[in-house]
């Protein structure tokens, strides 16, 4: 029996770097691109909302909050839901993944409120299946850290309405609440053979940003160690050469020094290997931050990338994509398109593809119809055909 895994973390700012990871606008090095099309959003966004970042803002704007929200307030809480690797792969193999997702969504809605749950994405292109959920910490009731009563100074203060909606991540992430989440989530996952982790364990999670800060510090420390070992290596060579010239001294001293040199060289190689790995691991995160900044400054770039990725997923080659992005209509007599949502191909004849531009959004149309709606229509037709065929067989 493995463990149920749940990790909560406060989002920073607009959480753009994490959105880029979740929405795959930046491809992680540990993701299998051949399986990325299997990832799916488990929550439908409201009309006019295109992504996770907008969904967070939409919830805040429609929550009825009257208090001013400061720029440094936590607007979203990230929740990662999974289980021990072997158990999660077994759940997938046994065909229980859809039910596992449904049970996770049910637990999230009951625990944090359906309206506060604004995004949930299933990732199947990494080593272990998992869900990235996003909760906006809208709460009601008296504040957990309510201010103590004012001293009697003759002044009277108007008491704020206790049940007003407010944005408060501290209430949602209170220590007693975190323990309750661990307990109730493990109970919900027990039907899949997953149990709670050790209660009171001293193990602590760290944030993604903290991890990379520590990794960068480790990088600098390794560089310093590298330089020290290089100096020691040179000094050791000098001692070895000196002993070699003075052959009349004890041979065991020479052998000991030679062993010391070999040990130093081995340590140096180990440090160099760690340094290379640290630099390799840190570089993708730095590139992701830069790309997120570009997305902030030029929002339509992100939309262009989304459409380009959609074109790639449905099976269009790069030359076709280039034609569409210069405003040309693409006419094809017959083509089999892969539906990312249904993981199957649908064939269309006399196809006319075109990218239509809206004020802040792009849309890929097939014969004047949103291609995602076209896929859903084709899938419904396929289901209807299958049902009719089954009905005829039963009658026979």
Image (tube, helix red, strand yellow):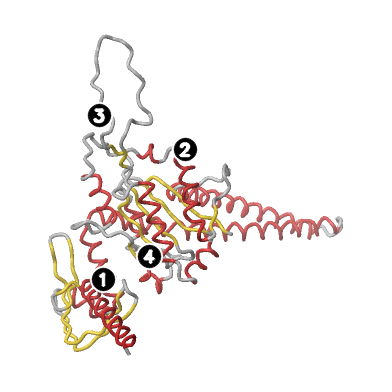
Front residue of this view, candidates 377 and 328: 377
Q: Earlier in the sequence, mark 1 or mark 3?
A: 3
Instruction: Identify the residue under disc 2.
Output: 176
Q: Position of residue 286 (x, y in %)?
A: 39, 55
Label annotation for residue 27? 4
Q: Earlier in the sequence, mark 2 or mark 1?
A: 2
Mark 2 vs mark 4: in front: 2
Does residue 281 sit above or below 177 in this rendering? Answer: below
Front residue of this view, candidates 10 and 348: 348
Q: Earlier in the sequence, mark 1 or mark 4?
A: 4
Instruction: Identify the residue under disc 1.
Output: 308
Secondary structure of the residue carrying numbered label 3: loop
Q: For residue 239, which quarter of the picture?
A: bottom right
Spatial CA span between label 1 and label 4: 14 Å
Mark 1 vs mark 3: in front: 3
Mark 4 vs mark 3: in front: 3
Spatial CA span between label 1 and label 3: 49 Å
């Amino acid at each position: 029996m493995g463990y149920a895994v749940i990790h909560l973390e406060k989002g920073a700012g607009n959480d753009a770097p994490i959105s880029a990871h979740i929405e795959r606008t930046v491809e992680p090095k540990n993701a299998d691109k051949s399986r990325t099309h299997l990832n799916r959003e488990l929550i439908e966004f409201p009309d006019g909302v295109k992504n996770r970042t907008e969904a967070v803002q939409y919830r805040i704007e429609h929550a009825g909050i009257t208090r001013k929200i400061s720029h440094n307030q936590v607007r979203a809480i990230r929740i990662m839901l999974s289980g021990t690797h072997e158990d999660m792969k077994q759940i997938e193999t046994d065909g229980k993944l859809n039910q596992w997702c449904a049970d996770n969504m049910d637990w999230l809605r009951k625990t944090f409120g359906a309206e506060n749950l604004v995004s949930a994405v299933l990732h199947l292109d990494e080593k272990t299946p998992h869900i990235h959920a996003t909760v906006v910490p809208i709460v009601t009731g008296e504040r957990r850290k309510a201010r103590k009563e004012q001293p009697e100074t003759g002044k009277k203060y108007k008491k704020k309405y206790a049940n007003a909606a407010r944005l408060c991540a501290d209430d949602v992430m209170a220590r007693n609440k975190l323990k309750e989440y661990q307990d109730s989530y493990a109970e919900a996952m027990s039907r899949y053979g997953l149990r709670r982790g050790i209660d009171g364990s001293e193990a602590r999670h760290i944030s993604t940003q903290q991890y990379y800060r520590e990794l960068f510090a480790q990088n600098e420390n390794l560089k310093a160690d590298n330089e020290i070992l290089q100096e020691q290596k040179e000094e050791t060579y000098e001692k070895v050469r000196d002993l070699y010239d003075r052959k009349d001294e004890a041979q065991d001293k020479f052998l000991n020094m030679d062993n010391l040199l070999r040990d130093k060289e081995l340590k140096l190689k180990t440090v160099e290997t760690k340094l290379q790995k640290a630099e390799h691991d840190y570089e993708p995160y730095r590139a992701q931050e830069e790309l997120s900044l570009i997305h902030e400054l030029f929002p339509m770039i992100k939309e262009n990338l989304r459409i380009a990725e959609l074109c790639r997923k449905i099976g269009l080659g790069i030359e076709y994509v280039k034609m569409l992005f210069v405003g040309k209509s693409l006419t094809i007599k017959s083509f089999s398109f892969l539906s990312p949502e249904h993981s199957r191909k649908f064939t269309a004849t006399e196809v006319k593809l075109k990218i239509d531009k809206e004020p802040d959004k792009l849309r890929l149309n097939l014969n004047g119809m949103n291609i995602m709606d076209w896929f859903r229509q084709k899938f419904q037709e396929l289901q209807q055909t299958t049902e009719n065929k089954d009905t005829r067989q039963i009658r026979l």
